[in-house]
Image: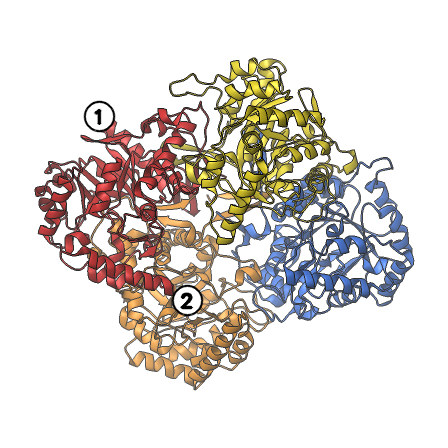
Chain colours: A blue, B yellow, C red, D orange
Amino acid sequence: MVDSVEIGMGRTARKSYGLGDVSIVPSRRTRSSSKVSTSWQIDAYRFALPMLTHPSDAISSPRVINEVGRLGGLGVLNAEGLWARYADPEAALARILEKSSDDEAEGLLAGSVDLLQELYAAPVDPDLLKQVIVDLKAAGNTVAVRVSPQNAASLTPVVVAAGIDMLVIQGTIVSAEHVEKGGEPLNLKSFIADQDVPVIVGGCSNYQSATHLMRTGAAGVIVGYGAGSTTTTNEVLGIDVPMATAIADAAAARRSYLDETGGRYVHVIADGDLQTSADVVKAIACGADAVMLGEQLTAAEEVPGQGFYWVSAASHPQLPRGHVSYCGGADVPLETLLLGPASTTLGDTNIFGALRRAMAKTGYSDLKEFQKVELSVQG
Amino acid sequence: MVDSVEIGMGRTARKSYGLGDVSIVPSRRTRSSSKVSTSWQIDAYRFALPMLTHPSDAISSPRVINEVGRLGGLGVLNAEGLWARYADPEAALARILEKSSDDEAEGLLAGSVDLLQELYAAPVDPDLLKQVIVDLKAAGNTVAVRVSPQNAASLTPVVVAAGIDMLVIQGTIVSAEHVEKGGEPLNLKSFIADQDVPVIVGGCSNYQSATHLMRTGAAGVIVGYGAGSTTTTNEVLGIDVPMATAIADAAAARRSYLDETGGRYVHVIADGDLQTSADVVKAIACGADAVMLGEQLTAAEEVPGQGFYWVSAASHPQLPRGHVSYCGGADVPLETLLLGPASTTLGDTNIFGALRRAMAKTGYSDLKEFQKVELSVQG
Amino acid sequence: MVDSVEIGMGRTARKSYGLGDVSIVPSRRTRSSSKVSTSWQIDAYRFALPMLTHPSDAISSPRVINEVGRLGGLGVLNAEGLWARYADPEAALARILEKSSDDEAEGLLAGSVDLLQELYAAPVDPDLLKQVIVDLKAAGNTVAVRVSPQNAASLTPVVVAAGIDMLVIQGTIVSAEHVEKGGEPLNLKSFIADQDVPVIVGGCSNYQSATHLMRTGAAGVIVGYGAGSTTTTNEVLGIDVPMATAIADAAAARRSYLDETGGRYVHVIADGDLQTSADVVKAIACGADAVMLGEQLTAAEEVPGQGFYWVSAASHPQLPRGHVSYCGGADVPLETLLLGPASTTLGDTNIFGALRRAMAKTGYSDLKEFQKVELSVQG
Amino acid sequence: MVDSVEIGMGRTARKSYGLGDVSIVPSRRTRSSSKVSTSWQIDAYRFALPMLTHPSDAISSPRVINEVGRLGGLGVLNAEGLWARYADPEAALARILEKSSDDEAEGLLAGSVDLLQELYAAPVDPDLLKQVIVDLKAAGNTVAVRVSPQNAASLTPVVVAAGIDMLVIQGTIVSAEHVEKGGEPLNLKSFIADQDVPVIVGGCSNYQSATHLMRTGAAGVIVGYGAGSTTTTNEVLGIDVPMATAIADAAAARRSYLDETGGRYVHVIADGDLQTSADVVKAIACGADAVMLGEQLTAAEEVPGQGFYWVSAASHPQLPRGHVSYCGGADVPLETLLLGPASTTLGDTNIFGALRRAMAKTGYSDLKEFQKVELSVQG
């Protein structure tokens, strides 16, 4: 039973809500922040923080993955990113940053798109990719690697052989069965069944699509496509995923699937519309088990993008749905950004301290309980 | 059954929605863009792209009509435009552009209205009009020509004699029967019955008015009046046509009329509120068979307006409802604008590539099916 | 039966709508503008235009009242304005304009309030007031004069003796019975019964208050308090009168009162939220019989305020609810502003031509019928 | 029975409203302002004005508390503010103002947070605190002092011994029973039972939390956490308290608790979202017995912050939820600000004159009656 409106005679539309539309209402006893746990476990892996990095080259470099791991989260390496295509990824990165700084100065929005297209047209080098994974493993990380649905079949053997712990199959919109021209479609169900590592897959956008992805045997599904200030999927395709609704729907799918399978719990990971610590809090409150952070990490001084951000869809050769934009200061240690103490007052630092405190103010002691917190929408 | 609210005691208003109010929600399997068809057939004419040009002199010159035809769409010539009034339309155009550039520099909004009124007061020259049509035919185009309801009776014989393939009778608001002062009203039903070419007529704004126009025997009805950033019908008359609602209503009228006639399918053509490729996608999703593009084409380097845009209502002698404004860059080939690859990231180029991809992401293979895609409105 | 929401447990609020929230939807046959009548008759007086002037000294000078009368409307003189207080009202006016121009240049909003308070503290001179009325009569005008509820008892004999045709008792919020400290309250019912001229009274804001005012025996009631860009009643008092709802409510009261009295028709006059010709159209569409124009007239070259505007409440000695602001160009003849042809495209000129055309586009031939036109609110 | 929406499948959210969402609708007879009383009595204390000061050091200095008392309101001293920590509070204040002026000039938002953290880390000096209280008593004030929930146990004996008349236990979100790490939780019920002075406690945010606080035996509960332009709880924690809904909910709790106890009336004090006199009016209209003014008082020339404002949460060492910002002119006597005559037109001066007039315009003679005034929300 969902709320809908009739936009015209005989044509209905679902009423849906973004994270900015909802707020949290304290209504129970409070508790001390120190009595709150933000820990998250997926498959055999336990994390102090319920977070993954969005596999954007602007933020998710090997250095950042190491640091995020040290702080209690899970960095995700893009198997199709600059580190997998160039022996000297820093040089490619430098070209993007130089061009984008010039564009920014001139107010050009889509100026770097040609360059992104050129740089991401270079082939993935399996040996480079393997070496990055081996190094991350050697540093003691839980290693998660993202492949696109298009390249999942060819790249997965490479990254698995290199010893990854978790596989992330991620495109903007991923369906359980993709109808491909000519060649075979990727049957996610049989593909995932063949893997020995747990798989996270997405993005999806509502109950049906989340349910279908859960039935592939994935350990986690991603809700959303990393929408943020640099993405333009809404302007280009008219497709939008209001995150509060999409997360709540996926959480409902998680419950149904748990019942259907007699106990398989598939994690819901929110990716998109996350601008502040408040948005992270609300994503969990709407039903997410963890969040995927992208644009929010541009403020960290360790990130490769030095404050600039872009997503994979921005380098699409025919229809880029995003651009390179300056988002953050790149002047705060990642540790401050994630764990505080906050150096700012607008929800951009001490993100998980804010989550902890919001849980304390509303009287919840763990994330699973906090998914029941009372919500309001302004009328 | 439509949603309505009581604005005051005993006075209700219909709840209605613009294209900006709705979004598309992917909920099925995805498919490859290459397995999607955007083709559109009206009467005996088949087009690769479901589009017409709005008959504004700012964009719909003979040159552009030729090029749009080559690319798979249908250009519409205004039988009451500069090409029908002046042996040297370029000179008239040059005056508009010079005045408008000066106004733009000074921040004057309605500065060119006097000039438009003057230029469009010149009489239509039947010989000039015929010659343009003959040339367009000779170039191999399907030729569609727009006449106003006021001049339909006098101009239609001229354009039909010149060999047009399709007639477009278009005003801002057109009704099946117009009550005229003194003289005879134009009875659209008998008028259209007398024509040998298929007729498209509009604009209309809801179920009743769309139904009435369908009953005239038209092959297609236009929904909306080309509302955009240069039109001010809303500010002047208080009349507004929220396009998502109007298109869905007209689609409902199409279904009823199909049933009423045992099979006559009247095409619904959306004209207004179209700013981005996303808007084109949403118009089809709401039920349109095709879209009429105006302001969006100002970005093309081939258009006569060189980035400036105006509609017929802007030259009204007593009550202009629009002005000449600079809308676009006029710096992208029409082919790039319609078919890509996109040179920008905000939905202003590769418009029909975006439509194709949105259909693919939501799992639909033709336009008719895509009219059923799931919609959402943000709460 | 009105729509309401529960803002908190056990506390409801009425859902209400401003003119900007509603639009007009054409759904019938169209007709020629020339077959439309905008004429309005109240008591024995018939006007070509359904309009009064708001009795602000910024626009409603004797000169403007003469010109409005010539064009078919009804100017209202403020019996407590500068023309009734000063033998040389132009000098007082000049001081306001000079101070306000200086304030405007410095960005000061409330700078002229002290001066207004000082100027309006001067006593009304009955002889001056009488002379203005006598002159207006002599020029052939239907003469309407506004008194405040506070001064109705003392000033009415003066203006009636001078020969007015209509009395307007107007404050921001006027009730049928006012509880006064110490002295006697003004009992509007007995007061109006004692007058030989028809009385218009207001403002009121909903069904109950409109009904009460109708029962005083008034010929017309004013809905609203002239809210516009220079008034701040909402910010100061928290009182707001969303005009679409208030007008529709007053129209419902008119129907009930018509039934209750077996045929007394009390006119509903909308005063507030009128920025464009579209707003005038919508006010009639919501149920008003006529509109009171204030701020919109500042664009006329004949008005005394030379583009500046202020209302009576701005000169309140303890709690001014408005200020003097520059609103218009003062560069268009009043005739153009009211009757066209339009020299602009944003609904600020040819106001009643726009009303006429909106009626034509929606197929209505007189104002009373047009009160039934279909409305929409955007969802 | 509350209005709610389904934001996703199986997940509802309460519809809630801010003060800016509601307006007041006059619908009864009017009365003279002079026949209106704004007096407020809590426990044995009677005030001409229904107001307290928010215990921010930016506005609630001993000097201001004296002046507010003289004018008929109740100033609240922060027992953990600069006057309790520094023998020379003016010097500490001067450092904040100097730093904040520099930050303001540079557009830095959170620049002063470090300094606030440093200054508020100094220990409270019981002797200094006692002396301030003794001086305020000596000046004839009703003395109310605020302590935080964390320090209530340790500081209350100090301030009670110094002779306070009323105790305010105030944090952003306060619950009746707080779960503390390690040590004993503060049991508000037994704590308040032990006090000889009446206690005001808060903030709370809805029916449940208000009810729980009422059951502690408090004389008044605070609704909200002083949200304003300098607070960022919403951005940091995702917690928001839409004040119209929260006040109405607390008023419902007051009615239930009155019934439950057979007659104990607990006062509802609104703290937050108060920008103009209109907001004060609306807070009472929604059900508040009194308001707590903070940011609005920055315009007074007597306040220590000289136009800058900050709240306690802005000095939090780990997660500041606010900053120091310039809010007002600091150029109007407090008497003008509270009692008029208004020197401005936007609801920032003569706050309680505006309340008085709004009551008069709607026909109510005391605050308790005015809580029933008709409200509207714009649709």
**Residue count near mark 2 (Cα–Cα under 10 Å), binned few <14, some 14–19, many ≥20:** many
Relative to B65, B216 lies left or right? left
Q: Do the residues at discs 1 and 2 belong to one chain?
A: no
Looking at numbered disc 1 in the image, what kind of residue is underneath it? Gly
Q: Is residue C17 visible?
A: no
| Residue at numbered disc 1 | C263
Task: Say which chain tag 1 marks.
Answer: C
User: Could you tell me residue C371's position as x and y percent?
Assistant: 35, 30
Considering depth in this image, is A247 or A54 the residue closer to the camera? Answer: A54
Mark 1: secondary structure: loop
Gap between marks 1 and 2 measured at Cα: 55 Å
Mark 2: secondary structure: helix
Disc 1 or disc 2, which is closer to the eye?
1
User: Could you tell me residue C253's position as x and y percent?
Assistant: 28, 33
Looking at numbered disc 2 in the image, what kind of residue is underneath it? Glu
Quarter of the figure with residue B81: top right
* Quadrant (top left, top right, bottom left, bottom right) of the N terminus of chain C: top left
Q: Is residue B169 visible?
A: yes
Relative to C345, C43 lies left or right? left
Considering depth in this image, is C42 or D54 the residue closer to the camera? Answer: C42
| Residue at numbered disc 2 | D295
Residue A260 vs D366, above or below: the answer is above
Residue C223 vs B182, above or below: the answer is below
- Give the residue displayed 82% in from the left and 37% down from the top: A180
Q: Which mark is residue B191?
A: none
User: Could you tell me residue C20's position as x and y percent?
Assistant: 42, 42
Relative to D329, C113 lies left or right? left
